[in-house]
Structures are given as C-alpha cells and as structure tokens.
Amino acid sequence: MSKFYQAHKDTLDRAVEASRTRDYWSPYPEIASGKIYGETAKEDGAAAFKARLGQPFHLPGHPDGGTPVGAESSPYGRALNIKYPSAPVDTLVAASRKAGADWAAATIEDRVGVCLEILQRLNANSFEMAHAVSQTTGQAFMMAFQAGGPHAQDRGLEAVAYAYGEMIRTPTTAIWTKPQGKHDPLVMEKDYRIVPRGVALTIGCATFPTWNGYPGLFASLATGNPVIVKPHPGAILPLAITVETGRQVLKEAGFDPNVLLLAADEPGAEITKELVVHPDIKIIDFTGSNAFGQWVRENAGAGTQVYTEEAGVNSIVIASTDNFRGMCANIAFSLSLYSGQMCTAPQNIYVPENGIETDDGHKSFDEVAQGIKAAVDKLLADPDRAAGICGAISNDAVSKRVRDAEKLGTVLRPSETISALPEARTATPMILTIREADSKAHLEERFGPISFIIATRDAAQAITQAAALASDKGAITAAIYATDDATLDAAANAFAASGVGLSCNLTGGIFVNQNAAFSDYHVSGANPAGNACLTDTAFVASRFTIATIRRHKAA
Amino acid sequence: MSKFYQAHKDTLDRAVEASRTRDYWSPYPEIASGKIYGETAKEDGAAAFKARLGQPFHLPGHPDGGTPVGAESSPYGRALNIKYPSAPVDTLVAASRKAGADWAAATIEDRVGVCLEILQRLNANSFEMAHAVSQTTGQAFMMAFQAGGPHAQDRGLEAVAYAYGEMIRTPTTAIWTKPQGKHDPLVMEKDYRIVPRGVALTIGCATFPTWNGYPGLFASLATGNPVIVKPHPGAILPLAITVETGRQVLKEAGFDPNVLLLAADEPGAEITKELVVHPDIKIIDFTGSNAFGQWVRENAGAGTQVYTEEAGVNSIVIASTDNFRGMCANIAFSLSLYSGQMCTAPQNIYVPENGIETDDGHKSFDEVAQGIKAAVDKLLADPDRAAGICGAISNDAVSKRVRDAEKLGTVLRPSETISALPEARTATPMILTIREADSKAHLEERFGPISFIIATRDAAQAITQAAALASDKGAITAAIYATDDATLDAAANAFAASGVGLSCNLTGGIFVNQNAAFSDYHVSGANPAGNACLTDTAFVASRFTIATIRRHKAA
C-alpha cells in the first residue's frame, strides 16, 4: 500500500468524519506563524517568490515547444515577468491521456495518497503561495495566506475525502447467491471497477485561483482522471506552483508527472475555448462569469461532466437587531474584505423604508444606512489597516465598474483609494442608496466594492425580492438580521428554496462571505450562481463510473 | 414518525445493506405463485385487468378537463379501449408544483415511508400488473410478471435506498466550534435542509414501462420532488396503475395525491416535448431512443437534471469455450427472450473466421454459427414454449425492421411467426452472418430480433472492435467466451473502459440480458447508451441540494 496513503491515512479518516459531523476541523493551520510553519518559513516563502520573478517557470518533463507565455501583472503595481511552458492544446491533451492510463489503473489508496501528499507539501509552502496569490489577485497578504493556502487546502482535502468515500462505497468483489428452491443456488462472482471519465480540465479564476480551483482539481485527480489546469491569465503563478508540487509528488510515487499539466496563456490569446470543446476533455470545472459559464455549459461535449461556479447577487435583509453596532461592524467588514471581490460578498442590503427596531431604539432607514457607512469609515480609517483588509483591485475592469457605479443611485459613501498602497490599484467600498421601487441597478451583479442599501417596503417584501433575485440571477450567500423567529423562519424557507445559504444575525467574528470546508456547502447548484456545490456527493460521484464484470463462481 | 416508514424500516435497512454488499436480495418474490401472493391472486389480477378494458381510467382528484385520451393496442391482437384523464401541460405542472410544496417540506422518513408502501402495494398487485405489462408491451406473461412486477419493484426500492442513504448523510443540525487560541471559541449552530429540485418528469418507454420507469420515479419522489409520469402512448396502463396506487398511498398519508400525476397521450399527439421544455420541469428521467434522448438532453432547461437510458449495440465475443453446448444454449435464450426487444439483448456475435477451440474440439466459424442457430431452433421448436419465451412484437416498426433485415447479410436463420399466437404480432430471432471487413450493417442498433454472427480476424480484434463500437454508439451489456485469463482480462479492460458491464462464460441460468437490482449496475453513463446508471449515487445525489442556515450559538 502506498507510503503516502499510510502517512496521511489519519488525516483522511478525520476529513471523512468532519464531512459527516460538519463541525470545525482542519489539519492546515491558518495562522501565518513561524512557530507552526518553521522559524524561517516566512523569509523562505518571500525569497522563493522573489526568485520566481523575471524567470522562466520550469516544469521538467512538461510538454512544451511553443513560445513560453505569461503576462501577469500585480495589482500592487509590478509586472511579474514569469514565462510558463506552453504547448498546443492537442499536445497537452494527448500527453494527459497517455499519462492518465496508469493513473486510472492505480489503486484508490495510491491515488488518494498522492493527493494528500500534494496537499501536505502545498501546506508547507503556504508562505510562498501567499505571495503568489496576493501578487496576482490583489488580496492582502494575510487573506492570501489563509484563503490561498490553508483554506484552499481544506477545500482540496474535502474533495479528496468525498471522492474516497464514494469510491470505496462499492466493494471490489462480491459473491451473488440467488436461491433456486430445491435446486443449487445460482452463484456469480462479480468484480467492480472504478472507471475514471478521462481528461479533466480545471479552469481557474482571477481572484481565488487555489480556493476555487482545488476542489475540482483534487476531486478529478483522486477519482483517477488526469488534470489539465488552465489558470486565468492574470493569476497563473499560484496554480503553476500547485502543478509543480503535484508533478514532483507524482514522479516520486512512480507516475508520469503529466497526470497534472499546466495550460498557461495570455490575455487576448486564451486557449480556454479550444480546451473546452476538445473531444477528449471529459470533465470540466469552471469558476468565472455567468456569461462564460453559459458558454462552457453549452459548448462542452455531450458526454462531458461540467461543474461551474459562476456569479450571483448576494443580499442582506435587515428586519431588526438586538446589536446594532455589532451588525453594522459585521456588515462593514463583509463589504470591505478584499474590496468586495468575493463571490460570497454581499451586494444588496435591504432595509425597510420606515426603519427598524434595534437595541438602541428605532432607527430610520437613513440612520441604518449611516450606521453601516460609519462602520466602514471607522474600519478603514487607518490606511495600513485598510490595506490589510481591502488589498488591491484585481483588474482595471473592476476599477472602471466602481467609477461607473456613481450614477446608479445616491452615493452614500464614495469609493476611495488607499493611501498606504500608492502604487496599487485600490478602491474602498462604494455604497449607494436606492429605493427598490425606483431602481433596477441592484438587479444584476456588480462585481467589486459596490453595494446598494435598498429602501424596501418591509422585511417580508425584502425576503421575497432577494430570494426571487437569487433564483433569477443566482446567489451564493444571504444574511438576515431579525429578532423574531417568524422573520428568521421566513428567510430560511425563502433562501433555502432559492438554493442560497443563510447566515442569521452575524455580529461577531464570522462573516457572511466566509464558507468553511467540511461544514458550509459553498454554492448549491440550485440557482444560476453555479451548477455544482463545493463539496457534496454530486460533485464527486459522476467523475467516475463503475464497471461490473461477472462470471459463474467456480465450485 | 410515519407509520409507513415504521412498517417498512427493516426492508429499507436491508435494501441499503444489499446495495453495499451487492449480494442477491429482494423482498418481492419473483415466483408467480398463489402460495406467495395469495390463493386467488392470479384470478383476482386477471379479473382486475379485464375490468379495466373498454373503460375510463379513474384517478380521483386528478387534473382533467381535456378529452380523455388513450389508444393502446395489444401486440397480442386487441385494442384496450381504455381512456385516461387528460389535462393541458400547464395545468399538470401547476398542480404538481402546488402539491410539491408540502411534499418537499415532509420529513425524509415520511416520504420514504410513502414510497415503500407504494412499492409494497404494487408488489401485492403484481398479477394485474403482469397482464397490463404483457398486453401493452408484448412480453410473455411470465416475463411481464417478473420484469414488470417484482424486478421493477426491486429497481424502485433500490432507488429509494440510495436516495435515503444520501439524504441522511448530512446531519440536520451541527455545532461548529472553532478554537480561537486564548479567546473563547467561535461557536455556530447550523441547520441543513434537503431542498428538492422541483417538478420531476418520468418519460416511460414502450417495452419496460415499469422496470425502466421506477428508478427515476422513486428516486425523485423519495428526494421530495413531485412527479409527472408521461408513459409511452403504447404502454400507458402499467404506469397508470402505478400512479393510481401511488395517489392512494399519498392520500392516506395526508399528502395531496397530485404529488404523482399521469400525463397520458396518444400517438401523433404526444405532449412529451411540451413537458420537456416547460420551465418548471427540473428533473427528467427518460428511457427511449438515442435520437429522442439527444433531443431531450439538448432541449431541457439549463438547470434541469436529465437522466437518460438510450440505446446501444451489445456484443458477444466468442474466443473459445469449454462448454460449447452450454454456450450455444445460453446465447440462444438471450437472443430469443422477448424477441430481442431488450436494451440488454445481444446483437453482434463475433466469432474468429478461423474458428475456435472448444470442449468438443475445433469448431469452424460455420460450425459455431450453426451451433447457435440449432440451439435457437431447439429452444423454440415447441410453439407454446416459443410463445412463452418470445412473446409478441411491441410495434409494427420492429416487425418492419425484421423484414428489412434480410438484406443485411447472409440469412442463417429466418425470423418466423409463432403459430401458438396466431392473432399476435410475432417474430422469432433472425440471425445473419456477415464478414466484419465487408459489412457496416452491424455498426448500428437494430432493435428487435435481429442479430449478426460476425466473422472477425481473431478475438483480440473482436474485443477492440466491439468496445470501440460501444464507445461510439453505446452499449449496455457485453459477453465474452474464453478459456484463457489473458483474453478474459483483455475483454474486461476494454469493455470497462467503454463503460459496458461484462459477463464471462455464461452457460447456465444467468443470461447477459439480465441485470439484477442491488448488484448489477445497469447502464454506466459512460457511453452513448445513456448518461446515467440505474442505480448509483450519482443517480440520486443531484435530485436535491442542501441549504445551510447558520447562526451564533446562544451561550
């Protein structure tokens, strides 16, 4: 049995258990501390990242032959000048198929062991990954460490645990004995084989390349499918490091490292579509826009399994609260974190036009809106703190969207740059107020630090509207503030029916934009924000099929 | 807790266990005996069926308002003259949605209990069902009893067991406790809700309306989705009886019986397409042709879950045998059963052009072909026995296909009518010989009693060709006869990779066209014979999603 499997079996068992109990658990510490990761880990990670800059990215044995590609530019203000190997799509797919044969024939334990070892090594390298994620996506360093490192590794491990549980569900052999009355029974011996689908494609996104990429990547890998990783051209490095690590482990385990391939490209010369329509691509995991998600869903081959996380409009409904300050502070952090560039960030905040009851007495609509604005201002008053929370803006299109948003309503809080990051592309939250009856601006996703505080008739109307919007345009998260069970129940019913996870009365250290592995189902697959969930059984079960081989049992 | 659930909990537990061990198991006896089903069961079933003829089929409380429909005509030679309630598609879907609200909110145990009670009552009524299936599909009575009754019920129960297992996988509540070093931990209370997809549509087929219909029907029902059953216009009665039984149980359990609806129609005025494209249809289970299957897959709504069993070309490869007589007899039965009108029936029989080694010495290609022909002749020599095995031909298109097949090769055995069934539409197996290098006739499905004995270069070539054909056109079953492990292994590898179940050296009372619930995975979803498997986890896991509702835990 695989030494990697043996080494990580306890981690696997605990991951399977966590996915069932859904309590908090992680083997990958989220504290970026030298005490945990090694006294020199921080400096080593920084040095490793720095050594990548301006250099070709070597992947020994990887198909190449094309001109090296790569045009990443940091939102913090410098070009990375890293060039990655490139090869024609047909070459990549052929190499993947070739490597995939032995991978498909490997034991479940061998494959899962390799996956767990890859995750372990990625974890040890979390500091370098933090730099890579931060400098490609614009996330602040601490967030990049957590979301790009341990939390992404958690999501990968979760996928491996689900895949493992599903693969061992069917026995490898069975004896089938059918009584025949007075006659001898019919006895058949049956073998069951896990048959992987074939070449898998993981299409990465610009903002959370590892967190969103790892579930599909590891689910496909564990179930025996070779994987081609197609990063967003703006965020190649985090996934290139992942591929590099994976290939090293594969090679050490005796597999062809081409089980894991990198398909890098540059803006304006993307190879994504060519990969999607390739007849040998059998699984696609996509994170990105609804428009391109639809294209992928409609253009992938007939038998191709497609899993998407697209986008949506996330809402908060404020009906009442017994902790007005805590509510405003909590919402302010959710709006500010990574400048709202999270698929889970709230955009629409519904407040009854006649105001709400709070622990601090009745608050008018304007007082609630001002409370949220003031909380954002306070949170971001210190420029260094603002930099640490907001980070930078992923790309120019987001910046432009923020500028254009001024016209969409009454500006309650203008977006500002962050003085502590003079060379970076930055934008703090822009908050607009609108009246629900008069506006359509809030009815579509406005990705970035743009949010609407919406004057609505009452909480019931807000819940109905927000849930309907989720069904229509998609949503991944929702939040409700209410002091009465009837309103909480109404929200739970409405958002559950629309396929949206609901957070109730968050006022402390948990935020609506955080979804934890092993506990929070991220995306439901039941509204346009995506067709799959990270991670549930459906996310892994179709990545392989089961072949039965039966014969009469020898007497 | 539901009384139905309590009554059938042991059956459910054993079904879950059987799906894991994959040993033989069934709670529904396949012996059509009065000792098991009650001394008067046979006569009662016959009388109940007879009483349906020429009458309107009443479904109390079912939407109607249209002109009653129904134009079923028995392959045994009489019109059934049964008229079923009919209503506009919008009316049916609206009634389904309305009834579905309470059904979605019911407990897992309540829903599963209702499903198990429906199956129990269907089992008790297996004699009437046998008449209904036989007289609409053409199956011989004994086969209609088994395949249309207990075996179909097994497949329904299997789907319920998988659905149940998947629904209880996630706890209904969890406490999530995240340590915060020296500070108090973050504690969240989380509720998880099963959220059904919405209205499900089951599209029945003409040949096995219950066996192929029950898996999807019960999987959708158990997971909380109301179901509209759209039978093939030629085989309405078996599914109408199923709907009738289901509605009675639903009503007794306090649910709106419209959770289960019948959408009957007539040839030339089918309402299938209108149902498929209806925006409120969220799940579709389809059994039928590749052409219409493709239409369904391409035209169903973007978020609709579509599960298909389509068609394919099933092959037998003969490399060698240590039981020539047993092999020929086994194949003869597989060709004759229900006149080859099974999605699992073999069509292509590959034999090396230089013959094979057997326990009876070397046999030339012609001798092998003659051996199979002679076994069919012997099996069907007695007209009553022929009637009992072959039954009747489902529809005129199959009869025409048999007549037209004469030109496709050298006729080794002409198809004949069955003298014991003078008023029925009958056709015994037509067997043609062809040379693989010279023919394309065997490269497409020829549904009905048409098979090709194909002269091939050698067994290795035959395995490669048959597996490639399965990948290209689909296949559900394959069989290999070989006395050496190398050939058996080569076949296992090739057919597994093509998503086909393989039977090795069948010479006794098990036939390649039989797939047993809880043990044999029927259809893989990995070739064009269908995109889903009856039944595996993937078949049930996407019929619902899970909503998370989380809040700070009260101290």
Image (cartoon, coloured by chain):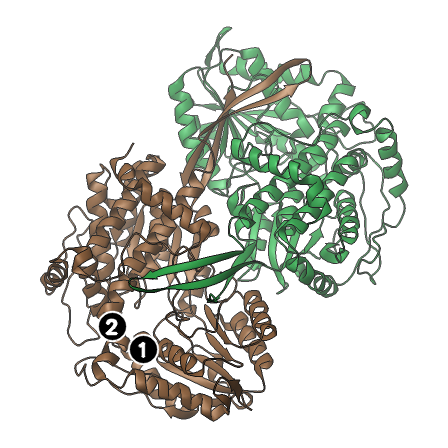
Chain colours: A green, B brown
Looking at the rendered structure, which numbered label has been put on residue B205? none
Q: Earlier in the sequence, mark 2 or mark 1?
A: 2
Residue drawn at the location 65% of the way across and 36% of the way down: A10
Residue B407 visible to an observer of this rendering: yes
| Image quadrant where residue B82 sits | bottom left
Residue drawn at the location 69% of the way across and 40% of the way down: A8
> Vertically, is B9 above or below B334?
above
Amino acid marked by disc 2:
Gly
> Vertically, is B431 above or below B531?
below
Q: Which structural element holds mark 1?
A: helix
Q: Which structural element holds mark 2?
A: loop
Nearer the observer, A243 or B378? B378
- Chain containing mark 1: B
Report whether mark 2 lies on the same chain as mark 1: yes
> Vertically, is A208 above or below B178?
below
Amino acid marked by disc 1:
Ser
In percent of width and height, residue A30 lies at 71, 28
In percent of width and height, residue A466 lies at 46, 31
Total marks drawn? 2
Nearer the observer, B147 or A141? B147
| Image quadrant where residue A330 sits | top right
In percent of width and height, residue A484 lies at 41, 16
- Chain containing mark 2: B
**Distance between the alpha carbons at the discs numbered 2 and 1:** 10 Å
Residue at numbered disc 2: B138
Residue at numbered disc 1: B339
Query: Given contact means CB atoms under 8 Å apart, are the residues at marks 2 and 1 in contact?
Result: yes
